Image (cartoon, rainbow, N blue to C red):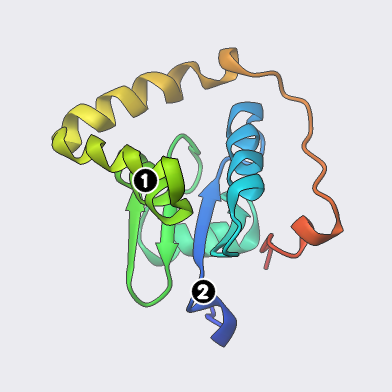
């Protein structure tokens, strides 16, 4: 099954995250609160849309320990590079994260993997309940 791209998605960045992880949900909230330019949409990796994204790219679709950032018809990034790009797109003081580009990807990804392995210990699993305006930014199908 191919992921369908509607016209309005082409100009957005889509953040794919583990929808069952409290730590991941915390960072989704963080992005939502700072996305003043309305650049981001979100989809859990467990959703139909998320599963299609993974399947279309032959990516693992049962283990959800990686964040993906997708710009439809352009690129997708994972792990450390995705975090740097999100910070750059949010802008302002968060643009300073681009200094992290001086690290080789394998070093940044090793740090990402360390956090990912311990993420369930770093945050509780309380459910994030987006408000009506924020719900518009979530893609399920």
Judge depth for marks 2 and 1 and give the one in front.
Answer: 1
Q: Residues within 10 Å of mark 2 (few under 14, many from 20)?
A: some
Q: Give coordinates of residue 12: x percent, y percent.
A: 51, 70
First of labels 2, 1 by sequence position: 2
Q: Give coordinates of residue 51: x percent, y percent.
A: 54, 57
Q: Nearer the viewer, residue 124 or 56?
A: 124
In the displayed structure, would residue 122 be above or below residue 128?
Answer: above
- Return the residue at label 2: 3
Report helix, strand or loop for mark 1. Answer: helix
Q: Give coordinates of residue 130: x percent, y percent.
A: 80, 48
Look at the image and tell me whether residue 92 can be seen.
yes
Residue furthest out toward the bottom: 7
Question: Where, quadrant-wise, is the C terminus in this rendering?
Answer: bottom right
Which residue is painted at 64% across and 33% down in the image? 26
Which residue is painted at 52% across and 21% down in the image? 119
Look at the image and tell me whether residue 67 can be seen.
no
User: In the rendered picture of this protein, how many numbered marks are placed on residues?
Assistant: 2
- Return the residue at label 1: 95
Which residue is painted at 63% across and 61% down in the image? 48
Q: Give coordinates of residue 42: x percent, y percent.
A: 60, 56
- Along the horizontal axis of the image, is 73 left or right of 45? left
Residue furthest out toward the right: 132
Report helix, strand or loop for mark 2. Answer: loop
């Amino acid at each position: 099954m191919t992921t369908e791209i509607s016209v309005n998605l082409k100009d957005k960045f889509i953040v794919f995250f583990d929808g069952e992880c409290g730590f991941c949900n915390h960072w989704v909230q963080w992005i939502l609160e700072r996305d003043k330019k309305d650049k981001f949409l979100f989809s859990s990796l467990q959703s139909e849309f998320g599963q299609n994204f993974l399947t279309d790219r032959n990516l693992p679709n049962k283990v959800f320990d990686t964040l993906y950032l997708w710009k439809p018809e352009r690129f997708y990034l994972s792990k450390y590079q995705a975090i740097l790009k999100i910070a750059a797109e949010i802008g302002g003081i968060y643009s300073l994260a681009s200094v992290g580009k001086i690290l080789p990807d394998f070093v940044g990804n090793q740090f990402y993997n360390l956090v990912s392995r311990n993420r369930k210990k770093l945050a509780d699993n309380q459910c994030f309940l987006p408000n009506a305006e924020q719900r518009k930014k979530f893609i399920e199908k």
